[in-house]
Image: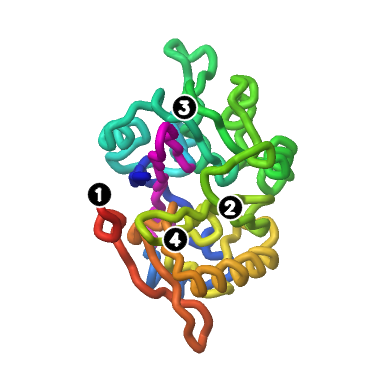
C-alpha cells in the first residue's frame, strides 16, 4: 500500500460559523481571520494505492460552480485536484474508487464536472465506483432546510445517474469506518493502517486542531449535542489506539495526535505527512 496527500486548494468560511458559541477572542488565537472575519481552510484529500485499486477519499469543491458561488467561498491557492493527482503520477481515469465521507459540496464537488461544451455533467472519474451509505444518501437527497445549501444536487444526483454509485452496506472492504451523526447524518471517518501506524481521515468531525476542546463545535453541525457524543467516543479511541489524525480542513496542520490532560483531550504531536511516512 502507498498513500498520497492530494491538495485540491483552499477556501474561506466565516470564523464565527466555524466555531459556533466560542468567542472570536478565543478562536482567533489558533485560526486568525481576515478583515471580513473569514478563515482559510484546506481541501486536503487522500489517495490510497493498494494492489490494483486506487482509492480517493473525498475530492474537494471542484470547479463547475458559478463565479457567484466561488465569490462566497473564495477558492484560492495553486493546487487543484487534477494537478495534484498528476503530481503524484496519476490521471483521474486511473481512480477505481471514490470514497465520500459525506456529500457536502466541499467534500464531493470534484467528483462531477461539465462536459466540453458545458451542456451536461460527466464523471470526473469515469472508471471509479463512488461510495456513500444508504442513510446519508437519503439525508442528502432529501435535505432539511438547514443543510440544503450544502447538498448541491449537481454534485450528488449525477453519481447515481452515471450508474457509478454503491453503498458501503453492499460490500466495502478497503478499511474500517467510524460513523458520526452530529455534523450531518452518517458521516464516515475512514480508519486506515499504514506503515505500522493507524490513521483516521477526520472529514468534519474535527475540522482543525483549534477545534479540539469539546465545546468547539461548528455552527454548521445539525445536532451539536450529538457531535459532542461522537467526539467523546472518537477521542477515547484516538488516544487509546494512538491514532494519527489526517486533517482535511486544517490549513496549517496536516496530521496531529491527541493526548489526555486534566482539561480533557488536547493537541499532542503535529506532523507533516511526508515526514511521518516513508515515501
> CA separation, marks 1 and 2?
25 Å
| Helix, strand or loop: magenta stretch | strand
Mark 1 vs 4: CB contact within 8 A: no
- Counting every numbered tag in the picture gives 4
How crowded pointer 4 is (Cα within 10 Å; few <14, some 14-19, many 20+) is rated as some
Q: Which residue is mark 4?
A: 198
**Element at label 4:** strand
Name the mark nearer the viewer: 3 or 2.
2
> CA separation, marks 1 and 3?
33 Å
Name the mark nearer the viewer: 1 or 3.
1
- Residue drawn at x 55%, y 29% is 129
> CA separation, marks 3 and 2?
30 Å
Q: Percent x, y for residue 40?
A: 39, 54
In terms of sequence position, does the residue under pointer 1 or pointer 2 come before the other?
2
In terms of sequence position, does the residue under pointer 2 or pointer 4 come before the other?
2
Query: Residue 177: which disc?
Result: 2
How crowded pointer 2 is (Cα within 10 Å; few <14, some 14-19, many 20+) is rated as some
Name the mark nearer the viewer: 3 or 4.
4
**Magenta-tinted stretch:** 33-57
- Residue drawn at x 45%, y 78% is 259
In terms of sequence position, does the residue under pointer 1 or pointer 3 come before the other?
3
Q: Which residue is mark 3?
A: 64
Where on the picture, by quarter, is residue 231? bottom right
> CA separation, marks 2 and 4?
12 Å
> CA separation, marks 1 and 4?
17 Å
Amino acid at each position: 500500500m502507498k498513500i498520497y496527500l492530494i491538495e485540491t486548494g483552499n477556501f474561506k468560511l466565516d470564523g464565527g460559523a466555524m466555531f459556533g458559541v466560542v468567542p472570536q477572542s478565543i478562536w482567533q488565537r489558533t485560526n486568525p481571520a481576515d478583515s471580513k472575519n473569514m478563515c482559510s481552510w484546506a481541501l486536503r484529500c487522500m489517495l490510497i494505492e493498494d494492489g490494483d485499486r486506487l482509492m480517493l477519499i473525498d475530492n474537494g469543491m471542484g470547479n463547475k460552480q458559478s463565479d457567484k458561488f466561488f465569490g462566497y467561498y473564495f477558492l484560492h491557492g495553486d493546487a487543484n485536484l487534477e494537478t495534484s493527482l498528476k503530481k503524484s503520477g496519476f490521471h483521474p481515469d486511473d481512480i477505481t474508487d471514490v470514497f465520500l465521507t459525506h456529500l457536502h459540496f466541499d467534500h464531493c464537488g470534484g467528483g462531477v464536472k461539465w462536459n466540453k461544451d458545458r451542456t451536461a455533467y460527466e464523471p470526473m472519474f469515469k472508471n471509479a465506483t463512488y461510495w456513500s451509505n444508504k442513510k446519508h444518501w437519503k439525508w442528502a437527497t432529501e435535505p432539511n432546510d438547514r443543510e440544503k445549501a450544502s447538498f448541491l444536487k449537481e454534485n450528488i444526483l449525477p453519481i447515481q445517474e452515471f450508474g457509478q454509485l454503491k453503498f458501503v452496506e453492499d460490500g466495502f472492504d478497503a478499511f474500517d469506518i467510524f460513523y458520526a451523526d452530529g455534523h450531518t447524518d452518517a458521516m464516515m471517518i475512514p480508519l486506515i493502517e499504514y506503515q505500522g501506524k493507524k490513521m483516521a481521515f477526520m472529514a468534519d468531525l474535527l475540522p482543525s486542531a483549534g477545534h479540539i476542546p469539546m465545546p468547539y463545535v461548528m455552527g454548521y453541525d445539525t445536532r451539536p449535542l450529538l457531535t459532542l457524543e461522537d467526539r467523546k467516543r472518537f477521542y477515547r479511541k484516538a488516544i487509546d489506539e494512538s491514532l494519527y489524525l489526517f486533517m482535511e480542513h486544517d490549513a496549517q496542520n496536516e496530521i496531529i495526535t491527541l493526548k489526555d490532560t486534566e482539561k480533557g483531550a488536547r493537541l499532542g504531536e503535529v506532523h507533516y505527512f511526508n515526514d511521518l511516512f516513508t515515501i
